[in-house]
Image (tube, coloured by chain):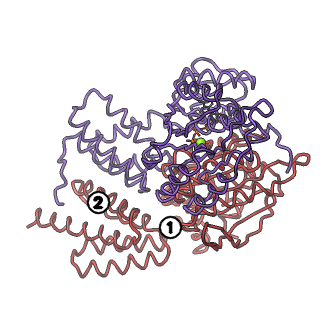
Chain colours: A red, B purple
């Protein structure tokens, strides 16, 4: 088992990084009538851990017995019948899924699942909750239609089905849905907090950490706890005992993007653009989300630029990312950004050095 | 199905008004509808306005008050965005429902029971234009025996031919006084203690959305017990603390790109919603006394554009960075037009 899973706190009491939130959640579910919840915050900040611990707090250890299934959905959409297949994780008390995986048909999934869950309402025997919990991940990726579908359903079935929504950016969740939930912000842990977690894991694994080693990992993690723990484990596999100056290896794809940035800075020509295109494509094929690539590329470029150009490059990054959202082929927009950058940079070079 | 314990419902549902007259703040609607409830003759209705202002509540209350619990099922069809409402449904489901004749035995069980059916189309702004067009016919064909209630947030998404057939009512965001009244009622029922400062805070952070106010209140009650202060409410509401906005503004004034970048990165890591941050930044900028109107205008234009991009789903970091960079250039009188484009 990876350390990220092995050292995921199982109960609200054991959660250390967002202790205050955990304490509050515990009080929140002390009665049967807790509202729907919307967790938001950057990735790797610990939302999932909080949610799982919360469900356990609601239903006890029984909620940990989950099974993963590939559920087939047969959906009657007026004139035709749609068939969809979607992964879901369920226990007797809750169901967890990523409805946005259904792409533009996400609306149907959202419509069906809640109704179905409401139908199979657990019987309210002593000490058990009379409702089920539905965890929907990545709700910020849901289409507008799907989000609309949630609205009235959330109210109508609120006695039998409680929703826990989870997303990175709450700006992308419609106001009507946000208005129906208690919004819980989960911030990224600070570097000090990350250091503490790493030291805790180190102790449990009987490792000796050189001074400042945990801090260096934390600094490279961008306040992403999951990444920090992954880095830590990678270092452990690479070499133990740790060396005081042991390098924390960057992720492969980040290394690759940083090379691309180097390529672009070195030469601005159609030929170079073509070769960069191939590399960007490679990243996309490996399922690195396009906006993540663009942001990383921007940050690598910014590191190498004079301040007058920074404003401009940053503007175009925002511009092309927005376009990318509206379009359907990310590669075009990534490439357009690179081309734009090359032309700006070349003109800048000519203007300054002739 | 297990009996619905009232306690297993969140407060927003528990305190949803059951009668039209209990709907707060929407006097115009309440007056007109109360009149028509007596004569039991109703036009088609269109309710529009922001979330949590009582639209669904009012529509359901009207239907219940007209028909009572017994006839409700056979006389009222509620379709919302969670039901499939493509053209086919409009053509078949609504038609089937509308076509079955109703008996005219008025005043059953003390309810008016007028001789028509009600079709509630909640969240109608998410219906396709085609489906709306298909509805026109249905509305005409069955105009004697059905009444349609359309409910939506954005009236512009309802096609004109439908809108013009209805009596339109705008649901206003609730004023702080009205909200206070409703909140105090709930506090009474639940045995909570709210001082006047907390009450006015609740009014301002929920921005006229009573549902939000009730949710905050319930959460605060669970977390902090029966005595709730203004700070307790702020901490559950997730509004962005003013100093976060101020420090972004200061970073922009510094004229140093990297300083602004660091600040933006921090804001994103803290998880503050950028759309809301932009609103709060707008306030700071409009009220700032040391910047000229022209600078303000430039910044505000950018804020508007960024807000639109966010609605389209653009990345929060990139948009906020773009805003920060524009603001910086406007404040420090740097070159506005990008030089190499
Ligand atoms: N005018 C009001 N008077 C009394 N209670 C209200 C009023 N408006 C909202 N509420 C409270 O807020 C809850 C939600 O209101 P409602 O469902 O009517 O909102 P809505 O206008 O339909 O919003 P949406 O556009 O998001 O569907 C109700 O359950 C009730 O508790
Ligand atoms: Mg509604």
Q: In which quarter of the image is residue B91?
A: bottom right
Residue A205 screen position, x and y as percent: 70, 64
Residue at the (57%, 22%) spot, across then down: B178
Q: Mark 2, chain letter?
A: A
Residue at the (60%, 43%) spot, across then down: B147
The answer to whether residue A183 of the structure is visible from this angle is no
Which disc number belongs to residue A248?
1
Q: From what the image shows, is residue A175 above or below residue A258?
A: above
Which residue occupies the foreground of this view, B301 or B62? B62
| Secondary structure found at label 2 | helix
Give the residue at mark 2.
Answer: A316
The answer to whether residue A192 of the structure is visible from this angle is yes
Residue at the (75%, 63%) spot, across then down: A90
Dot 1: within a 10 Å radius of its alpha carbon, few (fewer than 14), some, or many (20 or more) residues? some
Residue B175 screen position, x and y as percent: 52, 25
Q: In which quarter of the image is residue B235?
A: top right
Q: Which circle's residue, 1 or 2, is located before the other in the chain?
A: 1
Asked whether the residues under the numbered discs 1 and 2 touch, taking CB atoms below 8 Å apart as contact, a structural biologist would say: no
Dot 2: within a 10 Å radius of its alpha carbon, few (fewer than 14), some, or many (20 or more) residues? many
Q: Mark 1, chain letter?
A: A
Residue A113 screen position, x and y as percent: 69, 60
Q: How far apart in space, not on screen, are marks 1 and 2 (Cα)?
A: 32 Å
Answer left or right for B270 relative to B262: right
């Amino acid at each position: 088992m990876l350390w990220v899973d092995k050292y995921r706190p199982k109960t609200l009491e054991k959660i250390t990084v967002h202790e205050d939130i955990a304490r509050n959640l515990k009080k929140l579910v002390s009665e049967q009538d807790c509202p729907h919840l919307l967790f938001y915050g950057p990735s790797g900040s610990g939302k999932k851990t909080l949610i799982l611990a919360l469900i356990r707090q609601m239903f006890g250890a029984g909620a940990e017995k989950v099974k993963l299934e590939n559920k087939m959905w047969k959906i009657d959409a007026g004139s035709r019948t749609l068939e969809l297949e979607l992964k879901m994780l369920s226990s007797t008390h809750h169901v967890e899924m990523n409805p946005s995986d259904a792409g533009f048909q996400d609306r149907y999934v959202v419509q069906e699942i809640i109704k179905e869950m409401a139908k199979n309402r657990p019987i309210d025997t002593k000490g058990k909750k009379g409702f089920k919990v539905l965890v929907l991940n990545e709700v910020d990726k849901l289409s507008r239609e799907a989000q609309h579908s949630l609205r009235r359903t959330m109210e109508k079935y609120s006695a039998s089905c409680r929703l826990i929504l989870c997303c990175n950016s709450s700006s992308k969740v419609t106001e009507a849905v946000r208005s129906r939930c208690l919004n819980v912000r989960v911030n990224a842990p600070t570097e000090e907090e990350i250091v503490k977690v790493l030291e805790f894991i180190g102790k449990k694994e009987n490792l000796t950490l050189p001074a400042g080693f945990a801090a260096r990992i934390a600094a490279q993690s961008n306040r992403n706890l999951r990444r920090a723990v992954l880095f830590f484990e990678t270092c452990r596999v690479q070499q133990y005992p740790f060396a005081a100056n042991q390098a924390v290896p960057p992720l492969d794809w980040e290394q690759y993007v940083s090379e691309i940035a180097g390529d672009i800075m070195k030469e601005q020509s159609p030929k170079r653009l073509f070769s960069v295109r191939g590399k960007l494509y490679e990243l996309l094929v490996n399922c690195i989300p396009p906006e993540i690539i663009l942001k990383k590329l921007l940050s690598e470029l910014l590191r190498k630029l004079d301040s007058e150009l920074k404003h401009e490059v940053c503007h175009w990054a925002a511009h092309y990312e927005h376009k990318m959202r509206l379009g359907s082929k990310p590669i075009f927009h990534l490439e357009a950004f690179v081309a734009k950058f090359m032309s700006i940079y070349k003109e800048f070079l000519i203007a300054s050095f002739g | 199905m297990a009996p619905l314990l009232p306690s297993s419902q969140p407060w927003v549902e528990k305190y949803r008004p059951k009668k039209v007259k209990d709907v707060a703040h929407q006097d115009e609607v309440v007056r007109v509808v109360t009149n028509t409830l007596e004569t039991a003759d109703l036009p088609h209705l269109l309710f529009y306005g922001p979330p949590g202002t009582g639209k669904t509540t009012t529509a359901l209350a009207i239907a219940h008050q007209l028909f009572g619990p017994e006839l409700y099922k056979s006389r009222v069809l509620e379709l919302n965005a969670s039901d499939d409402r493509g053209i086919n449904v409009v053509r078949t489901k609504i038609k089937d429902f509308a076509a079955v004749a109703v008996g005219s035995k008025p005043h059953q069980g003390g309810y008016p029971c007028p001789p028509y059916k009600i079709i509630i189309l909640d969240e109608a702004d998410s219906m396709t234009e085609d489906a709306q067009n298909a509805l026109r016919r249905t509305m005409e064909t069955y105009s004697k025996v059905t009444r349609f209630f359309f409910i939506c947030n954005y009236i512009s998404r309802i096609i004109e031919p439908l809108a013009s057939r209805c009596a339109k009512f705008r649901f206003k965001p609730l004023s702080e006084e009205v909200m206070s009244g409703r909140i105090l009622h709930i506090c009474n029922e639940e045995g909570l203690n709210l001082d006047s400062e907390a009450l006015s805070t609740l009014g301002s952070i929920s921005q006229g959305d009573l549902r939000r106010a009730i949710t905050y209140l319930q959460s605060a009650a669970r977390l902090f017990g029966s005595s709730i202060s203004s700070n307790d409410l702020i901490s559950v509401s997730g509004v962005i603390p003013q100093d976060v906005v101020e420090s972004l503004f200061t970073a922009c004034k510094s004229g140093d790109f990297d300083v602004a970048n660091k600040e933006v990165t921090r804001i994103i890591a803290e998880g503050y919603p950028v759309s809301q941050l932009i609103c709060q930044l707008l306030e700071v900028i409009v009220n700032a006394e040391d910047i000229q109107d022209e600078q303000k205008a430039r910044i505000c234009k950018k804020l508007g554009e960024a807000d639109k991009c966010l609605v389209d789903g653009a990345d929060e970091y990139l948009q906020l960075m773009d805003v920060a960079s524009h603001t910086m250039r406007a404040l420090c009188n740097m070159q506005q037009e990008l030089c190499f484009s």
